[in-house]
Image (tube, rainbow, N blue to C red):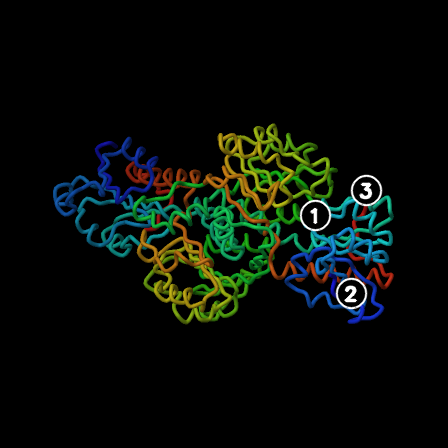
Amino acid sequence: MESQPPEERSQQRSKGLPQVLVMKPPPLLTLFEDKFISSKFQLLKAWESTLPLDQFLTTYAGSVRAVLCSGATPITPRIIRLLPSLQLVVTDSAGVNHIDLNECRRRGIAVTNAAGVFSDDAADAAVGLLIDVLRKISVADRFVRHGLWPAKGDYPLGFKLGGKRVGIVGLGSIGSAVAKRLEAFGCTVLYNSRKPKPWVPYPFYSNVHELAADSDVLIVCCGLTAETRHMINRRVMVALGKQGIIINVARGAIIDEKEMVECLAHGEIGGAGLDVFENEPNVPKQLLELDNVVLSPHRAVFTPEGFMAACDLVVANLEAFFQDKPLLSPLIHE
Amino acid sequence: MDSIGVLMACPMNSYLEQQLDKRFKLFRFWTVPDKSLFLASNKDSIQAVVGNASAGADAELVEALPKLEIVASFSVGLDKIDLAKCKEKGIRVTNTPDVLTEDVADLAIGLMLAVLRKLCESDRYVRSGKWKKGDYVLTTKFTGKEVGIIGLGRIGMAIAKRAEAFSCPISYYSRTKKPEINYKYYPSVVELAAHCDILVVACPLTKETHHIVNRDVINALGPKGVLINIGRGPHVDEPELVSALVEHRLGGAGLDVFENEPYVPEELFGLDNVVLLPHVGSGTVETREAMADLVIGNLEAHFQKKPLLTPVV
């Protein structure tokens, strides 16, 4: 039997405050719950109910105007249909691939993301993964920890980062931050983007295949959309070449993962640094056996500073919305 | 020149070994069963020694080789060579500066990122097969952290340039303040350590800089501080470092060098806040080849009575 529904519980706590629906708590909320205590809104916590989600929404979320979501709680047409009063979707991430943007556009629902607050951390992780792959940091660390240095002598040589041609796939906030860092290491930066950016000093390539053919490294920093799904395919990887390195801090599905695993296993590309995968938390078993890959469990943006800045931005967007003020980081539909 | 005897102190690079073998009469010191006997028998044939970070030409070796004219080091560090003795006897000394600066600086930043962002620990975690959704582990942001550099020579400056691209404020300690440099200067290593988040050792190893990172410095760096050593093991008081890490008095460490290589204190093997590397600072295919070419170039220049390429003495 349903004991006091969350909607009633929270109304008793803060009468009259507009509600923000949360279907499952994003990491931000779990880690920094106090930051979400606001005088402008209260949270409607669907996960605290024993009702199945659809029923909960129909019963309690009829007048909800805003929803806080994350990758684990996609905003699908079905969810949108169950929220007739919805006017705002706020996500905790920079990525918006889990939100049906077309449906939002059709319904006049605004969307905000956590643009910019994660860029430094994502760029730092991308550069860290690249140095790790080229200089074999994680695998050499394992070598030392297993006591192999005295027995086996000098460790095999890595490869120099300076002078490498780095192709950035998607020159947004994260891609630009990566470019700025790698220039200091003496890398040559090239990029592919939906449209050329004439104000940046780097050469533009209109497609990823040409970018790969002219690069030693590809760093994936773009969003996941219908166009970018499996954009890094076998043809692109073969163009990158046998010494080529791929770094992915964006979304797993931008790369054809099955093909990448084959290319790595057969030496068609030289190595990879991956923070994201097509079917997290599942990672293809063959990758676990390779020494030329560095693997990370989707943590590129997991720092307290990044998360706190994201919290502040999410709360600021919600408070602005409920005060009829302009949103801070609305997605502009191009 | 194939009658000129060159003694290679230890195995260091097969390309270099091949080139030395081709051009000179090469003696491989590590293959010799009795070193003193070997030296006594061959002392008049050896005119050059090629050393590296592990083994060079100490006073004893220099004294044992009366025909020694030049010591060419496959490294930029000179701590394994008795420079005073070489100078006294008119023996030339060369090293391999500049060609390895970028790789060592790259590795220093790589270690900072690996320690702060727990990259090696993340890789271990995924490989263990234990990754499940909902595991939130926060790591430490690198951008904007205060980086303190001990020794602002070629390598120190290259590290500073890279760290600046991550918006890291730079401070340094050096024997003398460099007025043309805009970074904040501290007149002691303890003060530098107290004011930075990440402390990097980038100075040469000499009598003065032995254990330059001692208990006081480690305490000043503190439980949130990270030490990066891409210099020489003896720059750091290793037992002090180990106990500070084990007792959480120091936040973390990225170490490419140790006091007694290839032996690394086993207490470090179980720690998540350290990254341990087997002295790979200049360890890339490209750079080791450039270093080998410099060694060969210096030796040939000397024996052809031309100016040395990168003389130290």
Describe the element under mark 3 as helix, strand or loop: helix
Residue B196, horizontal then vertical, whole percent: 52, 66
> Quick one: quadrant of the N terminus of chain A?
bottom right
Residue tagged by mark 1?
A95
Q: Farthest residue toward the front?
A: A1
Closer-to-camera residue (B223/A277) = A277
Residue tagged by mark 2?
A42
Closer-to-camera residue (B203/A159) = A159
Position of B206 relative to A119 (above/below): below
The disc at residue A102 is 3
Marks 3 and 1: which is nearer the front? 3
Residue at figure coordinates x 66%, y 62% from the top left:
A308
Q: CA distance from mark 1 to mark 2?
A: 25 Å
Marks 2 and 3: which is nearer the front? 2
The disc at residue B193 is none
Residue at figure coordinates x 45%, y 67% from the top left:
B248
Disc 1 residue type (three-letter): Gly
- Label 2: chain? A
Closer-to-camera residue (B299/A48) = A48
Count of numbered circles on the image: 3
Residue B102, horizontal then vertical, whole percent: 48, 47
Disc 3 residue type (three-letter): Asn
